[in-house]
Image: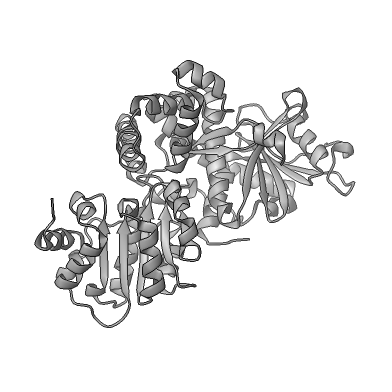
Amino acid sequence: MMVTKEELIAVLGQFNPWWRGEGIAGLPKWRRAAFREVYRWVSAPPAARALLISGARQVGKTTLMLQAIEVLLDAGVPAANILYATFDHPALKLAGVDALLEAWREREPRAEGPEFMFLDEAQFIRDWGAWIKHQVDFHRGRRIVFTGSAVPLMEAGQESGVGRWHTIRLTTLSFYEYIQIKKLEQALPPLPTVRSLRELFAWSPADFYRTGEVGAAYTGHFHEYLVRGGFPQTATLQNIVQIQRLLREDIIDKVLKHDMTALFGVRRVLDLEHTFLYLCLHDGGLLDMTDLCANLQVKRPTAQHFIELLESTHIIYRLPPYGYGKEVLRGRFKVYLADAAIAPAVMLKGKAILEDPSALGVATETAVFKHLFTRYYAQNVRFSYWRGKKDHEVDLVAEVGGEVVPFEVKYRQQHTGLRDLKGVMEFLKNSRVARGYIVTKAADDFGLVNDLPRETGGGDGRRPLILRVPAPLLCYWMGAAESSNDTN
């Protein structure tokens, strides 16, 4: 079956209304934090590379591209030199990218200046890696932005793609972005600007007290954020049942049942869905492959393959145990979902997690990890978890810029005391690390832990520093720092 050029031109005309002098309907004025970097690579690329925007479904990749197109048009770029196409469309997928380019140029002759090509869901382009490489190497007048929802496709093309594209990893909305998109900032008292958590170690007790009082107003919105999730399409909806139904349909129907079969040829979709549901029930926990295989009655290689696919489509993250060597390679992974709202949505739990302290703690830990990952992934951060003696543990260990920083989430009503810090203190002592963070719940459970024993460690004989910081404030500041494009 062939798609005629006339059919291609008709489809492209629908996707590119600016060719007819029309604007882009329904485009939000609010922009994700990543927009600044996207537009920098579109308007004045730092290197001769294409740009890949990678992320899960419904996190805003298409909107970012269309917003970049709108700014290009406002800047005077000829409409004929801008192409948008999504390879989710069956006609474009069937025709192929070269036929699409021919139809583009038959419909819109090239004007003076560079060409801008925005290609959505490029994983459906046949031999996409080789095609992008050829375009970058031999068509220097073209600036290419493409999106993808699957890491294996990036990895499969890494050898040919080295130096050919720059990747921006787009996660779900940060808590700061959620506040902005919900237009809540005018109703909330302003928080002080914090570009790095390290700044908090220089605060006075009065600074912590004043900010804690202000931060109390953010806690309820943070809990709503955990339930509604960081997906732009659901953030502004009011009905929780509708929100969770949409998230469930996007993940179960579109990712597990559509993408996995179309991209990876998965046939045992029901087993894959059961594997994912198992992970939803164990979000933020250690992955017990023996238990998973026994419960789901699948073989270990099959379960391992399913988990790798779920990670590849940005639905889950896997963290190895802290350290290096054979013991780490044999260790169990810790699994986080891509967003705290996914598990409640998939299991259709409504707001039940807000009444379950354990579930609320898990959701908070997932959100904290997502915010730290988003803030620092571009700096080649390595995330892991740590377990010591007597089951002492540290939820997250970040290795970035030559520094090791532990984070332990204690999201519960009671204030954090020394008895709650055994895992972090043991880690500081064994790893000779100078500082760590305890992520708390109460807005007034905020400040330095002053009574740590000197023998805890710190690397240079000095008493280490542990800071208690409420999760809503940490997530807000991490998102705000990302939005400010501060990389310190």
**Residue closest to the eye, 41 or 26:** 41
Q: In this view, does 303 lie to the left or right of 192?
A: left
On screen, residue 9 versus residue 443, left or right, reads: left
Locate residue 315, reporting x and y percent.
44, 39
Q: Percent from the top left, x then y, of residue 434?
A: 79, 47
Q: Which residue is drawn at 53% across and 54% down?
A: 480
- Colour pattern: one colour
The mark tally for this picture is 0
Q: Position of residue 403 (x, y in %)?
A: 72, 52
Quarter occupied by residue 86? bottom left
Q: Is 487 rendered above or below residue 295?
A: below
Is 39 in front, or is 381? 381
| Quarter assignment of residue 260 | top left
Instruction: Report if residue 450 is visible in the image.
Output: no
Residue at the (52%, 28%) spot, across then down: 360
Residue positioned 55% across, 31% down in the render: 284
Locate residue 231, reporting x and y percent.
38, 43
Q: Is residue 310 left or right of residue 106?
A: right
Q: Classify residue 100 as left or right of residue 121.
A: left
- With respect to residue 429, does 375 lie above or below? below
Image height of 282 relative to 396, above or below: above
- Residue farthest along the bottom direction in this orientation: 112
Image: 141 above or below 34? below
Q: Can residue 440 be seen in this view?
A: yes
Quarter of the image with the C terminus is: bottom right
Q: Nearer the viewer, residue 7 or 168?
A: 7
